[in-house]
Image: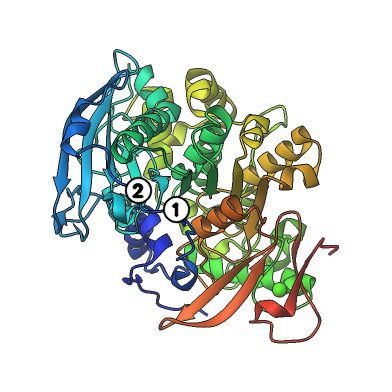
Amino acid sequence: MLYTARRDRRVCAEGGREAILGDHVKKVSIRQSIWTVFAAGCAVAAVVAFAAAPARAQQSCESLASVQIPNVTITAATSVTPPFDLPSLPGRYGTPSGQKVSVPFCRVVAYATPTSDSHINFEVWLPPAEKWNGLYLGEGNPGFVGAISYGGMAREVEQGYATASTDTGHADKEATGALPPWAEGHPELIADWGYRALHETTIAAKQLVKAYYGKPQKLSFYSSCHEGGNQALTEVQKYPMDFDGIAAGDPAYDITHLQAVSVYLSWVALKDGVKAPEYVPPSKFPVIHRAVLDKCDALDGVRDGIIEDPQLCHFDPATIQCPGKEDGPACLTPAQVKTVRQVYAGAKFADGKMIYPGLEPGSELDWHWMLSGPDPMAINKDFFANLVIGNADWDWHNFNLDRDTREADKEIGAMVNFTDPNLRPFEERGGKIIMYQSWQEAAIPPGGLVNYYKSVVKTIGGLSKTQNFARLFVVPDAGMCSGFSVGSYRGAWNALDVIEKWRETGVAPDKIITEHRVAGAVDRTHPVCPYPQAAIYKGKGDPYDASSFTCGNPKW
Ligand SMILES: [Ca+2]
């Protein structure tokens, strides 16, 4: 069932937190004639149990301009009276004009220069002391965009969080997600984007919080998705003291390899054009999806359109190969069968070592991201063109998986790939992290995060020790991220709510309930279990009700 979703305009925690990504998905999806849903779990969002007496500002907002922070220049500190017009930035990931902030806050504008080539713009927004919930919440960034996430900041400050956002060290005139030539000849700017900007922003923001309120935040959180999710995994590895609780969503993990598999899957399908035998027209994506469901939907005990663990689904596209040499709308030619097999198989080096897993069975309805053509997604193509090859006019048809992936690792891997499974320093500081991904995510293959989590479990010394502070939730039949989705069921949930509760109460999330809404009313719920568990149907009861499932280790 496809449904037309709408942007939920009510004040709603998660919707605000991922506003930038929401804009991104919405705009791109319009091109694909699919709308996004942004129906976050508003009813469960008001959870911050910060019961301390209201803090009193110890400094005026304006006096923050004289706070001394190493390598940081504060250019303005201004008391803002609502309504405040958000600075607008055109482009796919930008901040549309006309958005306003409805509450007063202290706006600090600054930049950091950790290296002589750096210029990391950031802003820190602080609610009045009596409105502050006592928490600091960092904002994430989408893609390679050089822009402060004003939309997200607005909603954070309206909900009482102290918040900050950075442009990641370069400023785009338009937030398009494509890569302008800012990086060429500026390795420090790549490092700023790769790991430094968010950290520099966070440590400066915390000093401003302490100066303004006269005390530090009670807890600091970070919740973001896609590149923001990658920033989360980077922080937990490299700067474990920055945040007490982290939600890392659909992370663009191991990014040189992620970009390699992305260009590769597009190259497989598109290298000879959209009329070539190996091209799979988007009209056949639902055909493949139907065949996958026929094969694997019932493995978990119920045909409900959801495949609980697609890695246990062994679907061979040859089962829907057209007879003889015919082609037809409801079957695949032999060349198309080969393409589909490669999409599932992912990318490997010439020596057979895995670069990045492919897309999962069940993700087919969203394959337009990489496979519809006529070119790879700009964000993938431009990564190699600008950051690796060093030629903005690079012809992606010449992509060589083994050679160009190795070149990417050599050129920039150390600055942008963070794959260290040792999260003990984060655990020892009392940190909690949920990692999450959608099995049906078709822009970032979820197998990368699953493999990373397995490596964390191995390093920490087993699943139970790891689950004390780090849990992975792989959401079946969700589009991407936690607050919005596309496709059939695609239930929504609130990632920040989950991590806040865990960190504040110490009670680990044993499962997450996703909700699907129609006209604001919940019509379906479904549980998501901590990996490697999956939801197993009890054998009776409404399959559209989460209570009809238990969490267990799948045996199918
Ligand atoms: Ca099922």
Can you name the residue that lies furthest to the bottom here? 541
Q: Where does residue 454 sit, x and y in percent of width and height? A: 73, 42
204 or 285, which is in the foreground?
204
Which amino acid does the dot numbered 1 rest on?
Ala
Q: Where does residue 7 sit, x and y in percent of width and height? A: 34, 70
Which amino acid does the dot numbered 2 rest on?
Ala
The circle drawn on residue 52 is 1
The circle drawn on residue 276 is none
Name which residue lies at 24% across and 49% down: 91
Query: Which secondary structure, mark 2?
Result: loop
Residue 435 in the figure: left or right of residue 443: right
**Ligand 1 sits in quadrant:** bottom right
Discs 1, 2 touching: Cβ within 8 Å: yes
* Residue 47 to residue 249: above or below: below
Crowd rating for badge 2 (residues with CA inside 10 Å; few <14, some 14–19, many 20+)? some
3D distance between C-alphas at marks 1 and 2: 8 Å
Crowd rating for badge 1 (residues with CA inside 10 Å; few <14, some 14–19, many 20+)? few
**Residue 397 seen in the figure:** yes
Query: Which secondary structure, mark 1?
Result: loop
Q: Quarter holding the C terminus? A: bottom right
* Residue 139 to residue 18: above or below: above
161 or 287, which is in the foreground?
161
Name which residue lies at 73% across and 60% down: 316
Identify residue for label 2: 55
**Residue 441 seen in the figure:** no
333 or 383, which is in the foreground?
383
Residue 352 in the figure: left or right of residue 475: right
